[in-house]
Image (tube, helix red, strand yellow):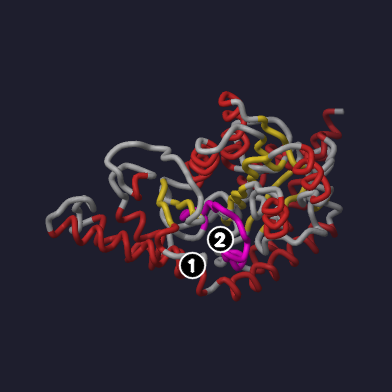
Amino acid sequence: MNTVYFDHNSTTALNPAVLDAMLPWLQGQHGNATSRHVFGRLGREAVETARKQVATSVGVQASQIVFTSGGTEANNFALKGITANLAASQVLVSAIEHPCVSRAAAALAWHDWQISTLEVNAQGVLDMADATAQLQAQKTGLISVMLANNETGAIQPIAELAALAKAHKALVHTDAVQALGKISLDFTALGVHAMTISSHKIGGPIGIGALVLDKRVDIAPLLHGGGQERGLRSGTENVAGIVGFAKACQLAVETVATRSEYLSGLRDQLETGLRALGVSVFAQQAQRLPNTSFFAVANIDGETLVIALDKAGYAVASGSACSSDSTEPSHVLLAMGVEADLARGAVRVSLGEHNTAAQIAGFLAALKQEVQRLKGLHAVAA
């Protein structure tokens, strides 16, 4: 049986065109990009060409791109590096952040920063009234709010938040890992000071990402060593990964409009079927990523349903893959005011461009069958 992959917010398959771009740097072109010989010079040229391509994909100059090992490192780099050069005050993070932001922020408490949480509404969207009140109440050094939530897909009002923060002289970082390749992304238009992007969410290789920085931001290095990445992120450059990331960015940006339209249609088909089954779909009224649907069936555990669907041939998630070690209900749904029992039943479907309407129809049939089976087991147990 061939399993249908519905977990693209977790990671994506490597695009064949990306692999083709990487292959020379995985085989014959093996020089260290800091070396002075011809192999090193070729590596350096490839890195800097890729830097320009990644920069173009988000509307910035090449000098604003710092390559990292991925989104987690870039988020930690942003929070720890920016606050290291500020006088300790308040850091604000939203209640729906990925753990690599919320836990990085919590660690700043050891350096005398006060960590406060920004609330979201019932649709999982930032409560701007709460943000205004917290900025007015206390001096804030840094705000970190994701552009699009990895579980619900809800898109946050980052440009509005950045304008508000500017009035209070606070810096803003946004985790845009889920947004890249799914919606149009322009760093300057958002008005933020730092932004995280990652390769493996857009058909690129795992293990490479970037932090995009406003040129005026003073940030301390996260890794010290040989001085790579303008001294901000030392370590031998992953040339093949960087080249692959750049190619993935190029392809993602070129096709974002058509991909978004196609995925929106699939998601609408899915959610029409879900509602017919009496399933609770979260954040329906919010502006969302075109590929993401987060739902729950009352009285059925999400992990149990995910396992059952996997056996039926459909790979889905019960939330963030990076939090899969936790049996607690989704912190995102709890922040939205969803009851804990229903939140424990949450299942995420995140679609990709190779998914089809026939796969959606098959999934809905399998879901109906598994829900009936699991409810029957509950009835027998009772």
Quarter where residue 91 is shown: top right
Image coordinates of residue 283 in percent, x first then y, are 79, 54
Which of the two residues, 175 or 108, is positioned nearer the viewer here? 108
Quarter where residue 204 is shown: bottom left
Residue under numbered circle 1: 57
Whichever of labels 1 and 2 marks the residue nearer the N terminus, that label is 1
Query: Which residue in the rendered view is the most extreme toward the top?
Result: 110
Image coordinates of residue 220 in percent, x first then y, are 44, 40
Q: Residues within 10 Å of mark 1 (few under 14, many from 20)?
A: many
**Residue under the point 23% across and 53% down:** 33
**Residue under the point 57% across and 67% down:** 353
Q: Quadrant where the N terminus lies? A: bottom right
Are dots 1 and 2 in contact, CB under 8 Å?
Answer: yes
Residue under numbered circle 2: 180
Taking 115 as reference, is 342 left or right? right
Verify whether residue 195 appears in magenta. yes
What is the magenta range? 182-201
Query: Under tag 1, what secondary structure?
Result: helix
Q: What amino acid does circle 2 point to?
A: Leu
